[in-house]
Amino acid sequence: MLRLYGRGCAAPRKGNAPVGDPAVPQWRCSSAVSRQALLQRSRQGALPDARSTVSSCRLLGMPKSRWPILALLFLLCVLVVLCSTCVAAGWLLSRPGVGVGPSRPGGSGTLRLFGAEPYTLDPALVRYTVSAEYVVEIFSGLVTLDEELRVVPDLAERWEVSPDGKIYTFFLREDVRFHNGRPVTATDFKYSLERACDPRTGSPVAGGYVGDIVGAQEMLNGQAEEISGIEVLDPRTLRIAIDAPKAYFLAKLTYSTAFVVDRDSVEQANWLERPNGTGPFRLAEHSRERIVLERNENYYRDKPDLKQVIFSLSGGSPMSMYENGELDIVRVGPGDVERVRDPANPLHAELSTVPQLDVYYLGFDVTQPPFDDVKVRQAFSLAIDRQKITDVVLKGMGYPAQGIVPPGMPGYEREHSLLAFDPQRAQRLVSESTYGDASRLPPITLSIGGRSGQLPAHIEAIAAMYRETLGLEVSVEQTEDLFAGRPQFFAGGWSADYPDPEDFLDILFHSQSDLNHMGYSNPQLDRLLEEARIASDPARRMNLYRQAEEMIIADAPWVPLWHSADYVLTKPYVRGAAHAAAIFPWLSNVSVEE
């Protein structure tokens, strides 16, 4: 899933996105990967602490007044002194960790978070984590992820798989209803999957997540009116045929593209203003200032303890809001990480650090000069000092990438780092390229995602490294939708949708993948990835992915930069908040002690 550097996130977690600010790392699964396992690796030194959050600034203004009468002026001064003393005392008493501690205003069962404006709430269109954070709470599918990122039943209470691994039969729960109380049927799922694959819907991700279903590609290509591999056996039974046995197929169904939607609702104008989903929460309010989710009283599993979740989309610095008792959970950014790491700081007791299954990177369009030359791409990779970026810019809230697949991926290990910092070799490769010298390279523009109009610190550092090592001036442009066009050179992030190397290597680098934004094609790599798709032996499958990763690094369509970790503060009265390595519906497990 795409991850945006320059955007805030709704809650403590992570996917693939355009990059503007490293502060916003963001998640999913086939085999289980536990938060405890990742934290254990961190304690053992395998994963340095990593994670950051964007903090905005609040500007406070002071009104001016004039008093023409000198006697009143004197009185006013006295009153100001007295009021200032009272306010200061009250502020000190209300600070977290000081005096009486944080107050808990608001109604019973309300959780307050800092959020970001989603690009969409349509499950079929989600490709950024900033959207997924809300969609997984409003909608749901046949299966879902738990806090250990294991695939577990959701709307389907159980399923059966044919001996050849190609036919899945799902049996729906009897008590499943949409938010408006209408029962969910197998026909609703057939409609939803076919809508996602309908070219008129324009889903940018359907091919990557449900393209394994027989007939899905034909519908995506406009060659069929329905998906031949989906069959409704009765109102509660759905049969899905896939093109080959694939170990990760169930995990892919946890992505929102496979979520069920209500046809009657979808066919109404402005249906996303009040979407009729099946998730634990329903959308009650969506304004410029906030998003409010309210408990779904028709929820088929244990009803959430929370009555509502309020996401503030504005209002100032999230960290200041947390310390002032206005938020219950917040991500920590580089500007605050040193003080919350300090055991003497009261906030340290509220800190959780969770390594993420993600990667931040620079990507090239390999069809555009000068990145149509592999030696130029390799030089750009060798010119980056990843250790300096993570130590100085991220303040230890990231750890240098050694490849594409992040540490902690179940069953996946590499023998040595595939990446290096070698300025001399970088310069030599440029001279050996078809351009012969850095001065002969065409103008280079690095595109970043976001809306802030500000240049993130890590982008400044990267531009400086290219200037110092290669003698190149790299221009930077910011765009809200990074992949609306064909950027020559771009900064991005990818967070796991499910903990399987396929979600990083196949879905991003296969030449036919809709999420391959580099124009990159290597027939030998395609064959390796296709062989890994159907490999039944886990060890052989992982070996195929290791070979694929080495091949991709050698071709250098990407410059992997770092992997992150979430630094999250949680108020002591919040219970059940699971800070996992990928996105999953977590709010239904949370409660707030009043």
Image: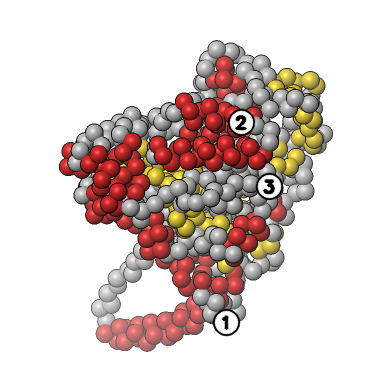
Q: Which residue is mark 3?
A: 32
The span from disc 3 to disc 2 (Cα, nearest Å) is: 18 Å
Q: Are marks 3 and 2 in contact (CB under 8 Å)?
A: no
Taking the view exactly as shown, the residue that stands out farthest to the left is 439
| Residue 443 horizontal/vertical position (percent) | 22, 39
**Secondary element at tag 3:** loop
| Residue 437 horizontal/vertical position (percent) | 19, 41
* Left or right relative to 541: residue 205: left
**Secondary element at tag 2:** helix
Type of the residue with mark 1: Gly
The earlier-in-sequence mark between 3 and 2 is 3
Query: Is residue 537 in sight in this rendering?
Result: yes
| Vertical arrangement, residue 228 with respect to residue 574, above or below | above
- From the image, state whether disc 2 or disc 1 is nearer to you: 2
Type of the residue with mark 2: Arg
The earlier-in-sequence mark between 1 and 3 is 3
Residue at image location 50% in from the left, 51% down from the top: 416
The span from disc 2 to disc 1 (Cα, nearest Å) is: 58 Å
* Left or right relative to 193: residue 342: left
Residue at image location 59% in from the left, 52% down from the top: 408
The span from disc 1 to disc 3 (Cα, nearest Å) is: 43 Å
- From the image, state whether disc 3 or disc 2 is nearer to you: 2
